[in-house]
Image (cartoon, grey):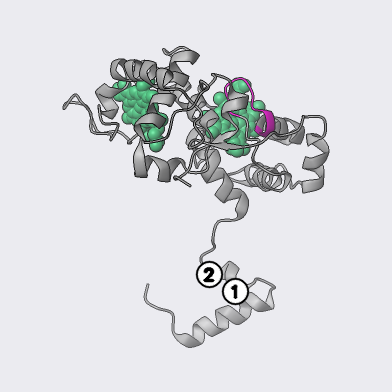
């Protein structure tokens, strides 16, 4: 198919206007806010297609639980057994997300308003202050413990330098776990997401084999190797407190 002749374009444009379609809807669309939030915060586990990775991560496509808005809001706000909480998302964000996942793919669970989300949120408890990975949120000793776990369980695939070049030359390359490229991919996500994802899927050759303590110690090591400063308190293996620490570039 070649370029449309200008006259045809004009007619198509006018037709669009005549039936009430904004010209933007005819052209390539930027993703709506709900889709954008989904891609940043949720697709890591539930996938762009909403198919999830069962049984580890449930599908959201054709999932009848999504008819229950209270369940969606509670899952996002407070997390659940293996899903991280998202205390930094506002009621408006959650309503955009709920609208997206309830109507994306072949889902058809209807729209929701921010007011409905706010009503469910009442009684779920207040969100506390947020922190950054640059705030000194692990200790030196913890990072050293984490390094031992990393060397034993992760380096074979992610590399001694954490750059994704495996120590074993027969292994395929993997994503880097520190520095610029890692930060770019993970920017805006919380340590609870990293903790939940790593705990459920890594080491890839033996998932869920780390204890929660080993998992959080490895995270301390990843941060330390990425240049983030140690502080006075250990990072706790507690999703709610990990959810308050956001990953991002050096301020
Ligand atoms: C680190 C992986 C991970 C991320 C990131 C994640 N989820 Fe989940 N999600 C899960 C897991 C695991 C469950 C099942 C929880 C359980 O069994 O308690 C779940 C459950 C859910 C459920 C409940 C489904 C049901 O069948 O009851 C919803 C809704 C949901 N997630 C939405 C989201 C949204 C929206 C986001 C992004 C803001 C998100 N999730 C991010 C792992 C994740
Ligand atoms: C057997 C090889 C292997 C081992 C061992 C392994 N990983 Fe991975 N890891 C992978 C592969 C492959 C991916 C990419 C997965 C994908 O994209 O589906 C990955 C992805 C990741 C990611 C997501 C990175 C991103 O930006 O998407 C994290 C975080 C991670 N691994 C952490 C760890 C930690 C921590 C350990 C040690 C406890 C570990 N991995 C051990 C192979 C491995």
Provide residue 197's location: percent of width, then percent of height.
48, 27
Q: Residue 230's mark? A: none
Residue occupied by mark 1:
23
Q: Tell me if the residue at label 2 has its CB under 8 Å from ligand 1.
A: no
106 drawn magenta: no
Position of residue 202 in the picture relative to residue 55 (left or right): left
Residue 115 vertical position relative to residue 81 in the rendered view, above or below:
below
Position of residue 151 in the picture relative to residue 208 (left or right): left
Q: Residues within 10 Å of mark 2 (few under 14, many from 20)?
A: few
Report helix, strand or loop for mark 2. Answer: loop
Image: magenta residue range:
76-84
Q: Nearer the viewer, residue 171 or 66?
A: 171
Position of residue 176 in the picture relative to residue 136 (left or right): left
Residue 113 in sight here: no
Residue 122 in sight here: yes
Instruction: Tell me the quadrant of the picture where the N terminus can be found.
Output: bottom left
Residue 73 lies in what quarter of the image? Answer: top right
Q: Residues within 10 Å of mark 1 (few under 14, many from 20)?
A: some
Provide residue 82's location: percent of width, then percent of height.
57, 22
Q: Nearer the viewer, residue 196 or 183?
A: 183
Residue 113 vertical position relative to residue 226 in the rendered view, above or below:
below
Ligand 1 placement by image quarter: top right
Residue sitting at 64 percent across and 46 percent down? 100
Q: Tell me if the residue at label 1 has its CB under 8 Å from ligand 1.
A: no
Residues at marks 1 and 2 touching, judged by CB atoms closer than 8 Å: yes
Residue 117 lies in what quarter of the image? Answer: top right
Provide residue 206's location: percent of width, then percent of height.
36, 15
Residue sitting at 56 percent across and 27 percent down? 242
Q: Nearer the viewer, residue 164 or 114?
A: 164
Q: Residue 27's mark? A: 2
Provide residue 114's location: percent of width, then percent of height.
77, 47
């Amino acid at each position: 198919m070649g370029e449309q002749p200008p006259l045809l374009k004009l007619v198509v444009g006018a037709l669009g206007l005549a039936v009430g379609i904004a010209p933007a809807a005819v052209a390539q669309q930027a993703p709506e806010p709900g889709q954008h939030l989904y891609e940043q915060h949720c697709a890591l586990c539930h996938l762009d297609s909403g198919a999830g990775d069962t049984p580890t991560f449930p599908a959201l496509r054709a999932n009848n639980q999504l008819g229950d808005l209270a369940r969606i809001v509670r899952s996002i706000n407070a997390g659940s057994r293996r899903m991280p909480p998202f205390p930094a998302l506002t009621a408006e964000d959650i309503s955009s997300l709920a609208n997206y996942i309830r109507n994306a793919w072949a889902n058809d669970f209807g729209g929701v308003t921010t007011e409905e989300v706010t009503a469910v949120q009442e009684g779920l408890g207040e969100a506390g202050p947020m922190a950054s990975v640059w705030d000194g949120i692990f200790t030196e000793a913890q990072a050293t413990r984490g390094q031992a776990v990393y060397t034993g369980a992760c380096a074979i695939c992610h590399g001694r330098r954490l750059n994704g070049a495996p120590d074993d030359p027969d292994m395929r390359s993997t994503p880097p776990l520190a520095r610029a490229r890692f930060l770019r991919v993970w920017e805006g996500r919380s340590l609870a997401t990293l903790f939940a994802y790593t705990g459920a899927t890594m080491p890839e050759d033996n998932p869920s084999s780390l204890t929660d303590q080993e998992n959080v110690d490895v995270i301390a090591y990843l941060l330390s190797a990425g240049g983030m400063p140690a502080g006075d308190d250990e990072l706790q293996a507690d999703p709610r407190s990990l959810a308050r620490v956001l990953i991002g570039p050096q301020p």
